[in-house]
Image (cartoon, rainbow, N blue to C red):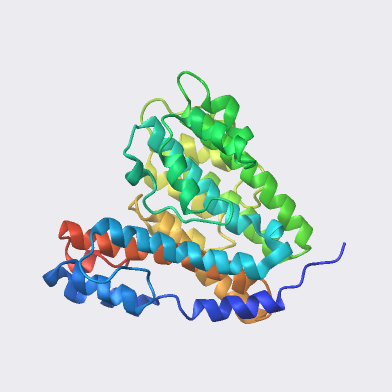
Amino acid sequence: MTAARWEDLATRARGLATHLLDARTIAALPATAAEEGLRPLAAALRGHGYPLPDGEVTPDDLELAVRRQAGARLAVLARWAGARNDLLAVIFEDEDRRSIRALVRGAVQSTAAELRVAGLVPTPELPERALRELAEQPSPGTIAVLLTAWGNPYGPALLREAKATQPNLLAIESALNVTFAERALRGGRATGNRVVMDHVRETIDLENALAALVLAGTETGAPRGAGAKQSFVTGGRRLSLPAFLETIAAGDPALARRVLARAFRDALPLARVFEHTADPSSIEEQLLRARIALLQQAELRDPAGVAAVLRFALRVRAEVIAVRRVIWGVVLGAPQDSLVAS
């Protein structure tokens, strides 16, 4: 099997990355918006290429612009990747998995359709129009049926669990995660590239870690024994099933994070996040930033390698999170220093 080549895509990804907002630019966004409402923020984002109409804008206009900007960037990457898209399931299908998970949760909770799509990044397989149509579905079962009709691989994976009278969110999300892991691992192996495979396995490990933290923090109703094992997705490298179960059984959130820090000790930036991030609402973003830093090191070691492509994709997601925080912080009148991640 011939290993895929990445020189051209790495060069183009670095070029695309020059248009991403760095930490200093994002930190400057709220500076005047807090005093004058959304107009200065909209003008600043418009100046950075965000697709916003002229004149007055609403928070929903800004939210949509963030999603469209991210989707456009991934669409360009997909177009340049060409036949290598199937090898990069860890990029595009990870976003699809996150979107479907959020849409299913929204359906279970009967959330308004416009809220279900908030923060979701369009991809070639699930563009903006598809996400909107899925957001309008009344139940997880109809989401599964629609995905299946479209030929999306996550549709059949959801059908059995999602069509139940009382859908089990844990079982649905486990089915999504297992399908993603299988497809991402298959694509990673097909690349013949260790960096891609390590990234896939790390993605699986971190999904397991975050699931374990959620289950560890559930005072009642958290699965134990066989039930907990069903939530574990195989294919990772650092977090074993015994460590996963130990995390859940820890009970105390700080103890659970220490168990995870030990499991990730050979990836120090990730271990530090688990050890030092006490706020559960920020841990996923902190892990994302740590992964970007690790990929930057890999990119420095091999500038023509795939690390530049993977890092670009994660930076797109990080920008969505950061800019959305600014938008809604301004709308809600949050203190300026709380609008930028520490």
Quadrant of the rendered structure where residue 297 is?
bottom right
Q: Quadrant of the N terminus?
A: bottom right
Of all residues, the one furthest to the front in this rendering is 54
92 up-or-down from 112: above or below: below
Give whichever of 302, 7 is nearer the camera. Answer: 7
222 up-or-down from 336: above or below: above
Give whichever of 45, 287 is nearer the camera. Answer: 45
258 up-or-down from 331: above or below: above
For the question of whether residue 259 can be seen, the reply is no
Q: How many marks?
A: 0
**What residue lies at 57% left-to-right and 32% top-to-bottom?**
158
Image location of residue 291, percent across then percent down:
52, 64
Image location of residue 185, percent across then percent down:
70, 51
Image location of residue 75, percent across then percent down:
56, 64
Give whichever of 250, 328 is nearer the camera. Answer: 328
For the question of whether residue 34 can be seen, the reply is yes
Of all residues, the one furthest to the left in this rendering is 35
**What residue lies at 74% left-to-right and 51% top-to-bottom?**
186
Q: Is residue 342 left or right of residue 70?
A: left
**What residue lies at 61% left-to-right and 41% top-to-bottom?**
150
